[in-house]
Amino acid sequence: MTILDSTLWIAAGSFGAGLLGALTGLGGGIVIVPLLTLVFHVHLRYAIGAALVSVIATSSGAAAAYVREGYTNIRVAMLLEIATVIGALLGAYAAAFVAPRALAVAFAVILLYSAYRSLRPLPDRASAAPPHPLAVRLRLNGTWPAPGGEQSYTVRHVPGGFAIMIVAGAISGLLGIGSGALKVLALDQAMRLPFKVSTATSNFMIGVTAAASAGIYLRRGYVDPGLALPVMLGVLAGALVGARMMAAARTRHLRTLFTGVIVVLAIEMLVRAARGEF
Amino acid sequence: MADDIDGAVARPPERPESALQLWIGRVLRGGVFVAALVAVFGGLIYLRRHGAALPEYATFHGVPNGLDSVHGIIRGALQGRGRWITQLALLLLIATPVARVALSVAAFAKERDGIYAAISAFVLALLLYSFLGGSF
């Protein structure tokens, strides 16, 4: 297979990942690393570098849409980005000292967690309970365009959410993913933001978190342009097409299918790690 | 994408942050669009020159010298080298969220929102450190 062939195949595979990721709402970034390492036999470090760059492209596109529609809580995002960026810097520095085999196992665990979350969605725990004192002082409480008109919400458990975000940032920096599932956990379950606000704010933060570790990855030589090009363009095109098809598609079966794919990839990564192939 | 109808649902400027929201949306989408265009341009040059060679991604040996620093990337891109132009596009992509944070610093400062201007500036400093740290 020449560089031209592999570029086209990787672009096609990334397109599929972006398309399914957008249609199911799970994000395509998470399957990029297994796709590159298991199917195209790319070294894990190059795969993580390419995936991280593509995460910035897709999350920025989605974040632009959400922010203009008024879903994103910019103050909450700005405050928590301190946590995710510090976490991401630590994670990206640590990545160099962690053996690829251990990274592969950690990746498989994250894949299995995402699959589990997709099958058992968390309840919407938004409430009008009194906010955390810090939320008042930092003016984090906000309003969002609910179906019935603007609705206000309060923000709770600010320190807890901040702590989870440090972990989310570290995992993002270590594995080159957006770790949106963990970000939503902090926003939605700990801080009790409405579900759509959590998703939008998480998306908004993913780009900045990924940019923090991407700088370090680039200087370490993990970002190879020949590889990142088809991945980034493929995922981006897939996500754009997926967002347009969203209304017409029957996402329930697709979601089950995509979750199945994630589980298979996770098991394959564990098997290969056990054989010492990373 | 869902924001194609933004002309139809233009929000009255009752939200204090609506101008900032508009600009953040523009910066994010513009950055990704420009990066994608430059990446395609660099990719075409790269594939025309090296498309018939064999890929070497199975073992990790970093990237060629100059693809891992800002000045190396800019120098190679100015010489018209395909992979360096593509890497410049990736650099633009990484810079897009950083530009968004810089914009937030300015917007919060203009609103005289000291706490959030400081928070944004701190995040910006961390990002610039990651971006340029050590080997500019």
Image (cartoon, coloured by chain):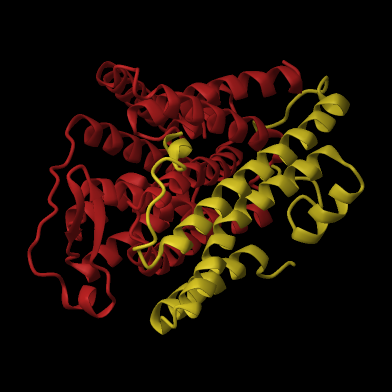
Count every numbered label the image shows and give the total. 0
Image side of residue A148 versus residue A21, left or right? left
Image side of residue A251 versus residue B5, left or right? left
Image side of residue A170 versus residue A57, left or right? left
**Residue A44 in sight from this viewpoint:** yes
Q: Residue at x 51, y 26 (%)?
A: A238
Residue B89 in the image: above or below residue B127 = above
Residue A95 in the image: above or below residue B128 = above
Q: Position of residue A116 (x, y in %)?
A: 22, 33
Q: Residue A110, located in which quarter of the rendered image? A: top left
Q: Which chain is painted in red?
A: A
**Residue B62 in sight from this viewpoint:** no
Q: Position of residue A155 (x, y in %)?
A: 19, 65
Q: Residue B75, located in which quarter of the rendered image? A: bottom right
Q: Position of residue B125 (x, y in %)?
A: 56, 74
For the view shown, which residue lies furthest in the left direction? A129
Q: Position of residue A11 (x, y in %)?
A: 61, 24
Q: Residue at x 27, y 74 (%)?
A: A139
Query: Between A167 and B113, which is closer to the camera in this rendering?
Result: B113
Q: Residue at x 78, y 35 (%)?
A: B41
Q: Which chain is painted in yellow?
A: B
Residue A97 in the image: above or below residue B61 = below
Image side of residue A137 versus residue A125, left or right? right
The N terminus of chain A: image quadrant: top right
